[in-house]
């Protein structure tokens, strides 16, 4: 059974809604992983992971590259299969006790988002180090991490933790270019049933924050406004939402 999640994951952030431009290899790997879980060690396509000391995949990239989206996608797939997993966003670690890691090694997948958030915190680094050691000992769970810092970063003060994080495989997540952002916006608008004209899309792309996370948040606000006004999303509506006279 799926364990209760501390947060509600965005239902529209799945593998189908992830624009793969430049990240095809890691998306294919993650799809192979979630399809193979919980018996991933017997999968012919995952031999590289099976041979590792630490069954750890780290997604490394900037704050809006899509790392969280991929973690959400993996968890949604496992939830549909009723495979045990847990998603934790370590940006929220101050609200928890570090014993939240206890017993996670018994799950099939441990998804840890924003691992860089605990860098420099001795207690949390030690707690994560202990969890990774238990994962190695039990040989059951696979760990999927997302971080803005690589394992060798001096921001992680515990040398043993840096060592453990380096035992896994690291994939750099490439942020989308302008073409990719346009594709992502069109796809998300279609999923929402939102009518988005070419003029509105172009205005949106050139007059708002350019990172994908901000664009998606803005699209959500525009979706709400479109429903309230019972109108198709237009350039005028985008201007009103952005406060442009």
Image: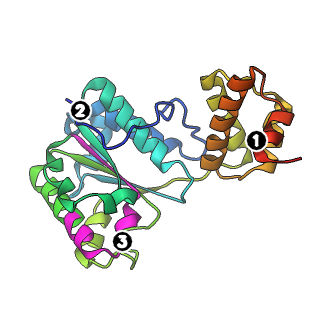
**Whole-percent x, y for residue 167 in the image:** 28, 63
The magenta stretch is 108-127
The CA span between labels 2 and 1 is: 39 Å
- Residue 1 is drawn in which quadrant? top left
Name the residue at 79% across, 38% down: 238
The answer to whether residue 195 is magenta is: no
Name the residue at 42% across, 40% down: 72
**Residue 36 drawn above or below residue 155:** above
Residue 50 appears left or right of 178: left
Q: Secondary structure at mark 1?
A: helix
Q: How is the image coloured?
A: rainbow
Residue 44 appears left or right of 147: left
- Give the number of the disc on residue 119: 3
Residue hosting label 2? 2
The CA span between labels 3 and 2 is: 29 Å
The answer to whether residue 115 is magenta is: yes
Mark 1 crowd level (few <14, some 14–19, many ≥20, 10 Å Cα): some
- Give the number of the disc on residue 241: 1
Which of labels 2 and 1 is toward the front? Answer: 1
**Whole-percent x, y for residue 19 in the image:** 59, 38
**Residue 50 drawn above or below residue 229:** below
Along the viewing direction, whichever of 29 and 151 lies nearer the viewer: 151
Residue 237 appears left or right of 101: right
Q: Secondary structure at mark 2?
A: loop
**Whole-percent x, y for residue 125 in the image:** 26, 70
């Amino acid at each position: 059974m799926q364990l209760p999640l501390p947060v509600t994951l965005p239902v529209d952030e799945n593998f189908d809604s992830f624009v793969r431009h430049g990240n095809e290899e890691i998306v294919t790997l993650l799809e192979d992983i979630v399809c193979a879980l919980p018996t991933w060690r017997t999968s012919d396509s995952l031999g590289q992971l099976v041979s590792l000391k630490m069954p750890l995949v780290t997604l490394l990239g900037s704050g809006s590259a899509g790392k969280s989206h991929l973690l959400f996608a993996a968890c949604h797939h496992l939830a549909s299969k009723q495979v045990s997993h847990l998603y934790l966003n370590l940006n929220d670690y101050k609200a928890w006790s570090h014993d939240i890691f206890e017993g996670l090694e018994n799950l099939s997948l441990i998804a840890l988002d924003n691992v860089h958030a605990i860098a420099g915190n001795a207690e949390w680094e030690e707690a994560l180090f202990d969890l990774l050691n238990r994962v190695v000992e039990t040989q059951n769970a696979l760990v999927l991490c997302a971080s803005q810092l690589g394992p060798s970063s001096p921001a992680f003060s515990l040398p043993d933790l840096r060592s453990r994080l380096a035992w896994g495989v690291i994939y750099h997540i490439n942020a989308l270019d302008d073409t990719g952002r346009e594709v992502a916006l069109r796809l998300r608008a279609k999923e929402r049933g939102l009518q988005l004209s070419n003029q509105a899309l172009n205005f949106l792309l050139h007059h708002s924050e350019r990172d994908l996370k901000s664009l998606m948040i803005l699209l959500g606000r525009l979706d709400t406004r479109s429903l309230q006004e019972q109108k198709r999303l237009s350039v005028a509506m985008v201007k009103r939402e952005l406060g442009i006279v």
